[in-house]
Amino acid sequence: MQLHKWNVLEGQARGVVTGHPQIPDNTYIYTSTIQKIEVEEPNIIIYTRNSIYHCPIESCAFREQDEYIRYYDGDINDSQIIPQYEQLKQKYTKQKAYIKDDSVLLTLSSSAPYAFDYIYCNTQEQGEIKFKTSPHIGQMADTFIIDGDIDKNRQVDIRYYAHSKKAIEFYKLKTHGMQLYIKNSGKESIKLSVEFCEHSMYIEPNQKIELRIPKKYRN
């Protein structure tokens, strides 16, 4: 089982689950009380009484985790502390610094729901953009929508068909002139295609590419 967009709060792990024998994929859950936490990069392994969760470190909700640690400073059970947390956070958030301001980084993984891991964008004028994501179930293919406001008049709007966790097709790439970078944080290659382009490509595990979008589609 895996947890995505996860964190550890008040003795429980919280996040979007996949691979659970009883709970549908993409359900946000609270686990039972944590018994033990181990590091097996690129995952954190969380043990409860009856379950084991593999949590990709890159998809940790670091901001919420930091707030919890500050609030409960010195009052957290040792078995519920993420080992080497500060070092891992620094290591796995470094890639955000690999793109310049006014660019968009979209991270995909075949193990994540709808292949979406996370998205990051920091603008010089407005700072870091907060994004919303929403899946839509379709008859032919499911779609996944990512949007975030740059300001009152400008928005990043990225949409794709999720043919599978290993094949997605973008049909909207609105970035208001900002360049889009895509990284595969998973362990399997992902096929990328764009509705208005003839060719497709594969992005391999740990590979990051610059998706060159014709300017007329970025605005």
Image (tube, rainbow, N blue to C red):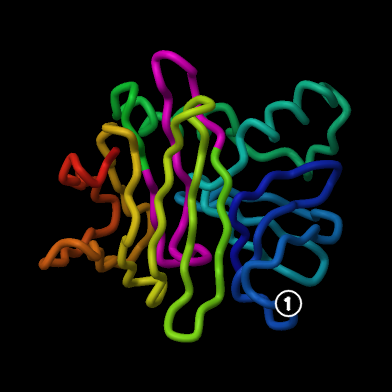
Corner quadrant of residue 27: bottom right
Indicate left or right for 163 with 20 as reference: left
Q: Position of residue 14 (x, y in %)?
A: 74, 52
Residue drawn at 19 percent across, 62 percent down = 196
Q: Position of residue 194 (x, y in %)?
A: 23, 62
Circle 1 packing at 10 Å, graded few (<14), some (14-19), many (20+), is few
Reply above or below: 103 against 32. above
Residue drawn at 49 percent across, 56 percent down = 145
Indicate left or right for 140 with 3 as reference: left
Identity, as a three-letter code, of the amino acid under mark 1: Ile
Indicate left or right for 1 with 59 as reference: right
The residue at the far left in this view is: 199
Residue 217 lies in the magenta stretch: no
Residue drawn at 74 percent across, 69 percent down = 51
Corner quadrant of residue 21: bottom right
Reply above or below: 161 against 123. below
State the residue position of label 1. 23
Residue drawn at 33 percent across, 68 percent down = 168
Q: Position of residue 119 (x, y in %)?
A: 45, 43
Q: Position of residue 96 (x, y in %)?
A: 39, 31
Secondary structure under badge 1? loop
Of the pair 157 and 30, the residue shown nearer to us: 157
In the rendered image, the quadrant that contains the C terminus is top left
Of the pair 213 and 59, the residue shown nearer to us: 213
Residue 113 lies in the magenta stretch: yes
Report the magenta residues as a range: 106-130
